Image: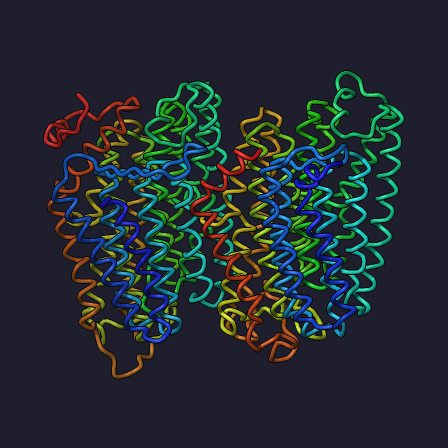
Amino acid sequence: MSGHDLLPLLPLIALAGGAVVVLVALTIRRSHALVFALTLVTLATAMGMLFVAARFGGYPNALLTVDCTALYFIGLILGASFVVAMLSQGYLRRQSARPEEFYILLLLATLGAGVLVASTHFASFFLGLEILSVSLYSLVAYRRSRRALEAGVKYLVLAGTSSAFLLLGMAFIYSQTGTMELGRLSLHFDGAVHLVMFAGLALVMVAVGFKLALVPFHLWTPDVYQGAPAPVSAFIATVSKGAVLALLLRYAGALDLFSNHAVMVMFAVLAILSMFTGNLLAVRQNNVKRLLAYSSISHLGYLLVALIAGGPRATVAVGFYLGAYFVTTLGAFGVVTVLSTADSDADSLTLYRGLFYRRPALAAVLTVMLLSLGGIPLTAGFVGKFLVLRAGAGAGAALWALSIVLVVSSVIGLYYYLRVIVVMCAQHPHEKTSLIPAPQGDVPRGAVTGPVAPAAAIALTVLTAGLIFLGVWPGPLIDLIAQLM
Amino acid sequence: MILAWLILIPMAAGLVATTAGARRPLLSRWVALAAMAVDLAIAVGLWANSGQPVRFEAAWIPAIGASFSLYLDGLSLLLVLLTSVMGLLAVLASWRGIAHRVGLFHFYLLGLLAGVMGIFLARDLLLFYAFWEVMLVPLYFLIAIWGGPRRARASIKLFLFTQLGGLFMLLAILGLYFVHGQVDGDYTFNYDRLLNTPMAESTAFALMLGFFAAFAVKLPAVPVHTWLTDAHEQSPISGGVDLTGLVIKVGAYGLLRYVVGLFPEAALGHFATFAMVLGVVGILYGGVLAFSQSDLKRLVAYSSISHMGFVLLGVFAWNTLALQGVVMLLLASGIATGSLFILIGMIHDRTGQRNLAQLGGLWDMLPRTGGLFLFFALAAMGLPMLMGFVGEILVLVGTFGVSPTFAILATGGLIVSVIYALWVVQAVFQGPRAAKLSAPVRDVSPREWAMLGATVVITVWLGLFPMCVLCTSAPALRSIQKTAPANPLPTGSVRAELRVQQGGQP
């Protein structure tokens, strides 16, 4: 492997190097501000390296490929990590005794996600997945409260099990095809698929379904999102899902996975179940983090509709929707982060009662994010949902059923997003309505009333502005994605 | 470019109002008033120059075929005029009534008006859908923040009903986009290019139903009307701002341009009979239920539903007279209902009541208010020489040529409307005094005279000289009708009127 081959890998190398540098810096001097600055520098360097890799990009070896698709998704992941780091700074200052290790784990998790997006081989697939997962085990349990430890152990056990399924599935596929390279598998999909091969594929899909939190592999999602620190929930909801989805997008297209009728039906069932279950379970929620967890399950269902449709329209739709979903989810969890205190996260809905009068800017940000999740025009969420519907509508009669399911479940979804907005607009503490949960006591306990940390404020402002900009003027981004993919 | 200003001015003014309003609420009121006055001036100027339709095109998302195209013909012009007048009334009506978060109120109000203007002007289907939603979100917030005691439920119901209809419309828009693209290779959302796309009958019917769902909810047609009564009732009461009145006109506009305009064979076949039945049911049900209400605002809401029943009937009768009647009715209903709302707000400000059981005998304390209320109750009921009569009679005569049965049943609605109109005047102003007035009480203030005086003048003038409106809408309606075969015309002396209008089919 020559030096020239290392050039496309520079973003990932920068991440790894940055993690090592931060580790070493910690041994010299334990300072939150220094570690925070180094993390941001690492992520910025990695983003800069993306442009270098774009010029020299290609196929460095059999394990990784850094083409335009990979660069786009790595860019999204790096951006998301940057925002999570900025949101975490104020949060960790209030909460944790030893905040520095958080950033190392964050960088390593980002590295794992990057490897996952660029992988072309089972080995790099597994490696990336494991780096991501192991970093997340510690991140989820970071606060070391009872809830957080419970969430961390739950995630550890379930992710470990799904990794075991993944390995067995990979073994079955290898036994049938003799190759571990993902690109070579297409030869074995036309005509009748051997039972062992199909079993292998199903087992791999269990692992993928777990990571994407699709129904029926979603049971961990609300508990882990609730127990983890809010920035970590944001990270899991965006980077962890996005990386696996990017991989699925690449290989569903390359292998023409959905031309096989059985596979298409399996995914269609997963999509319909996710869309309905995610939205229906969120309707009665009074905990904002669990509500966002269920809503993210339904959003992955919408994305699957576009994946199943296939074709160039679907690739553009998935790319744009994922970008919009990243911005929206980070914004929503960002508001939760900013409102959290040293004792507990701001997850109970009663804390948001009358937020519009107490902290109008934060309420406005959360409102815009919720409207984008609901798919209202002038937000990026609408353009994403529209592109998904366009991909679905143009792909034949079977996809019309999925499109109608998408539309109906979107309306169910709107109900609970609007309910949160109504709670924020509630004026009197004892206003009687069954829609708003009854508060305990007069003043909402636990909400932070001081000024927002500057890093978090900048992050939220940029996210909101970006969301509205992409909603009103999506043309440039759509053209960019169409060009890259 | 002038068309884009009609939309941009309210939006910009909204942003100014919200930033200024935090510290100086009066400034935000004046900004809003100025914006709507400028819009009205532009609209009147366009009316004075009327002749050719005006267009505006700009690129938006060329990758998927969506452009920022605006188009103003006679029909859109009249509705734009109506919107600017109702917007002015809304700003004036809320002058003293809304005292809390004034800047934000005007931000949402101007956003709502910009959205409604956009709907009447849009010529690109995706742009139309975007403005549809832009209209919905501010309305939701206006009711959720400043509304009555049960506003949470009313605002969510409003949003969910409209959104479900809107999403079916989005699916229909996408369906039309793909059908057209597969036939022509030209994937576009532009209305002019999508007109007359050849397609199978069943496809056309399914797509038409998608659009119809959205507009039937907005109109509102009877089975899906419950959002309107709750939203009307929980609208901000002080000042009496008729918010929902601003938006229900888009339902009728959509039916004309999109449902029958884009899919004439599907809409005017057997489906037309079904739609006319819904119209008649709306007229009679709305009227009967209006009579049985004890809350003034719900009563006016049901009378609105009754008027919209006439509109639905007229649209699907689809001949020149009926369509002219529809346009006149939209204007009349908007002005009359808006004025009634202002009067209900005035009564509520002075007595603290809007329940009929607690009102009565107000005439001797508030004679001028009573007089105005009587005038607008008669206008809403369709007294000749006032605007509402012209609309209703044109719709009835037009429908009679197509289906005498429906016309006879609809005329029953006229009787019901007389009953509830006179009943409400009697219950509020005559009889023993039940209400306690907070003394001293002023009858009609100068601001209120300005608003109601203007609407009185408009109602009488258009009732006596409706031709200026009918001549403006005639060419637009004629060009919409060109895409669809006209239903048979009524015979007799009405032919003379057709020749005078110069819009009649030979």
| Viewer-nearest residue: B179 or B251 | B179
Answer yes or no: is residue A305 visible. Answer: no
Residue sticking out furthest to the bottom? B440
- Could you say where residue A375 lies in the image, as x and y percent from the top left? 52, 47
Answer yes or no: is residue B175 visible. Answer: yes
Position of the N terminus of chain A by quadrant: top right
Residue at (33% x, 52% y) in the render = B114
Q: Indicate whether B181 appears above or below B85.
A: above
- Could you say where residue A462 lies in the image, as x and y percent from the top left? 51, 58
Position of the C terminus of chain A by quadrant: top right
Residue at (77% x, 25% y) in the render = A185
Residue A22 lies in quadrant: bottom right
- Could you say where residue B332 lies in the image, as x and y percent from the top left? 24, 49
Q: Is residue A217 left or right of residue B21?
A: right
- Could you say where residue B187 lies in the image, as x and y percent from the top left? 43, 27
Residue at (50% x, 52% y) in the render = A467
Q: Is residue A280 left or right of residue B112?
A: right
